[in-house]
Amino acid sequence: MARVVVNVMPKAEILDPQGQAVLRALGRIGVEGVTDVRQGKRFEIEVDDSVSDAELKRMAETLLTNTVIEDFEVVR
Amino acid sequence: MARVVVNVMPKAEILDPQGQAVLRALGRIGVEGVTDVRQGKRFEIEVDDSVSDAELKRMAETLLTNTVIEDFEVVR
């Protein structure tokens, strides 16, 4: 049994309205010096040791990521 | 200039319908051996070195996390 993390982020060339909204809100709470915020998804996945890297990649590509606009990274 | 990551996950006792939906969909793509999926958020933040840990914590608590149902972790 192991914990695997899959990080899914908007591709660099894709606008990220959620991240931009956070960036604009920072002034309201008096935080300066933040130059960019990007918002993505984090999946924490509990897997048996029998689950292969190829299966994790298929899961990330098929169920977790919209590969047109997002990139993913599997951290085992 | 540095990259900071803030991970926001649903608290352990909170139901996570998005993660459960992923778990149920795994059968469809023929992946076995996954026992749990939790979905949260990942923020990638570019900050000047002048931004303190306390400011990052305030930002995470105030803007990024619903602390009633979510926990956060700042990775500097």
Image (cartoon, coloured by chain):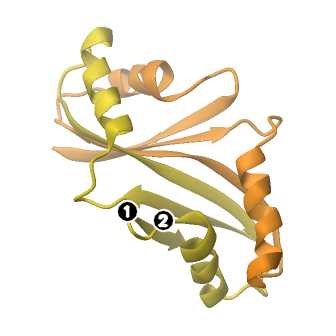
Chain colours: A yellow, B orange
Q: Quadrant of residue A23?
A: top left
Q: Which residue, given by chain and number where applicable, does mark 2 sit on?
A: A66
Residue at horizontal 59 percent and vertical 75 percent from the top: A62
What separation in Å lies between label 2 and label 1 (alpha carbons)?
Answer: 6 Å
Residue type at the position of mark 1: Ile
- Residue A9 rendering spot, x and y as whole percentages: 41, 57
Q: Which residue, given by chain and number where applicable, does mark 1 sit on?
A: A69
Residue type at the position of mark 2: Asn
Residue at horizontal 69 percent and vertical 38 percent from the top: B10
Q: Callout 2: helix, strand or loop? A: loop
- Residue A75 rendering spot, x and y as whole percentages: 53, 70
> Would you say A36 lies left or right of A44 here?
left
Q: Quadrant of residue A28?
A: top left
Confirm whether residue A45 shows in the render.
Answer: yes
Residue at horizontal 73 percent and vertical 35 percent from the top: B11
> Would you say A54 lies left or right of A69 here?
right
